[in-house]
Amino acid sequence: MEKEAKKPHQDHQYILALLENNSSQIEEIYKAHADKVKNFILKNSGTTDDAADVFQDALMTISRQFSLPGKVLTCPFGAYLMMVVRSLWMNELSRRKQKRVTISDLKGYTNKQDQYDFPFSEDDILKEELFKECFLKLGEKCKSILEGAWTGIPLMELAENLDMSYAFLRKKKSECISKLIKSVQESPMFKIIKS
């Protein structure tokens, strides 16, 4: 049986804008997301210049990722952008060899609604890298749900964006967090970090 082609999210237009170098739509991307990226970088040991560099690098990274034939965006562009920004910034902080880093946006991982606590603190680069590695192993649907929820999109709106019911989204979000925690706890790296 042939694999069904993924349906592009309505925000795939922004991917096309990047690939086609459509300046008016690229300007829209900056207007919609530059402040969020800047706030994230400033809250996490960076400067305004860092934020500008990371934003530019993130757009270039996304362009490269989606230049492959048949690759489509299946989640909101803003959620995907922030995932790339986080990844680039964590790598940059690792390169700068900062001893301790707090990624304040990740506090949503232990939010009361989910009733889960991650088995480690958030301020160690190795733990962040382990988390990122396990997160990237999740299916596309889980990544879309969690990224959307963690970037502050109200769950009702996120459910609508992802074309699913609110009840299903809440259930699926809990399942995705459970999978993520299990993946973290079963990782050989987690055992090394804990010891």
Image: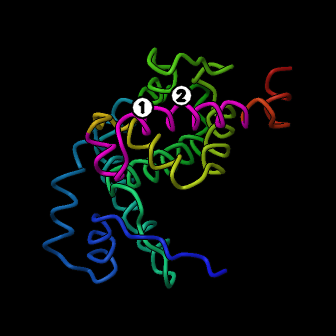
| Span shown in magenta | 157-183
The local crowd at label 2, few if under 14, some if 14 to 19, many if 20 or more residues have their Cα within 10 Å, is some
Query: Quick check: 38 above or below 25?
Result: above
Amino acid tagged 2: Val
Kindly report the secondary structure that dominates the magenta region of the rendered protein. Answer: helix
Labelled pair 1, 2 in contact (Cβ < 8 Å) = yes
- For disc 2, the marked residue is 101
Q: Residue at x 48, y 75 (%)?
A: 71
- For disc 1, the marked residue is 44
Q: Which of 172 and 9 is in front in this view?
A: 172
When asked about the image quadrant of residue 25, the answer is bottom left
> Which image quadrant: the C terminus?
top right
> In the image, residue 66 lies at what x, y percent?
45, 74
Q: Which residue is drawn at 57% across and 48% down?
A: 91
Amino acid tagged 1: Asn
Residue 22 horizontal side relative to residue 192, left or right: left
Q: Nearer the viewer, residue 79 or 39?
A: 79
Please, what secondary structure does the residue beneath circle 2 have? loop
Query: Quick check: 19 above or below 148?
Result: below
Instruction: Judge whether residue 164 is colored magenta.
Output: yes
